[in-house]
């Protein structure tokens, strides 16, 4: 399993073990309630997923780069849902 797969797997485990739905996870990490996840909010999600501090900044940037479809450097609900669906499909 690559490092990317390990990270995505940890995110999936966090969401499925600690939240009833992906929507609940998104709302929990959207601290300012703007319906978008900032880089800092994503870092908090990664911390909860037990991603090491050294990697959190890099991974949060990569997640934004990979899933931010509208180019605002934030992850909105549709982008988050797309990422979760991709993670779920990849782990089967």
Image (cartoon, rainbow, N blue to C red):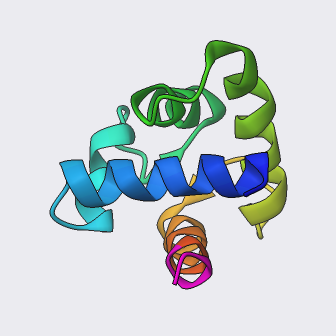
**Is 92 located above or below residue 25 in the figure?**
below
Q: Give left or right: position of 50 versus 68.
A: left
Outermost residue toward the front? 1
At 23% from the left edge and 67% from the top edge, which residue is drawn?
Answer: 21
- The front one of 72 and 91 is 91
At x 47% / y 66%, what residue is drawn? 77
Q: Which of the image's four quarters has the N terminus?
A: bottom right
Left or right, 82 with respect to 64, comes to left
Residue 28, position as x, y percentages in the image: 27, 42
Residue at x-position 63% and y-position 50%: 6
- Can residue 28 be found in the magenta stretch? no
Is residue 89 in the magenta section?
yes
Relative to the observer, which residue lies in front, 87 or 79? 87
Closer to the camera in the image, 73 or 66: 66
Spot the residue most to the top.
53
Above or below 13: residue 29: above
Image position of 81 with respect to 8: above or below: below
Q: Residue at x 15, y 63 (%)?
A: 20
- The x, y position of residue 49, in whole percent, is 44, 36
Question: Magenta stretch?
Answer: 88-92
Judged left or right of residue 64, residue 42 is left
Q: Horizontal and vertical percent for residue 92?
A: 51, 84
Magenta residues, dominant SS class: helix
Q: Position of residue 24 (x, y in %)?
A: 23, 57
Report whether residue 26 is seen.
no
């Amino acid at each position: 399993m690559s490092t990317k797969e390990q990270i995505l797997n940890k995110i999936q485990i966090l969401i499925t073990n600690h939240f009833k739905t992906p929507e609940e996870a998104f709302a929990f990490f959207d601290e300012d309630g703007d319906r978008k996840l900032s880089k800092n909010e994503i870092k908090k999600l990664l911390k909860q997923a037990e991603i090491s501090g050294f990697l959190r900044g890099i991974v949060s940037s990569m997640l934004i780069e990979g899933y931010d479809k509208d180019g605002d450097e934030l992850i909105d609900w549709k982008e988050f849902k797309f990422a979760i669906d991709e993670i779920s499909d990849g782990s089967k």
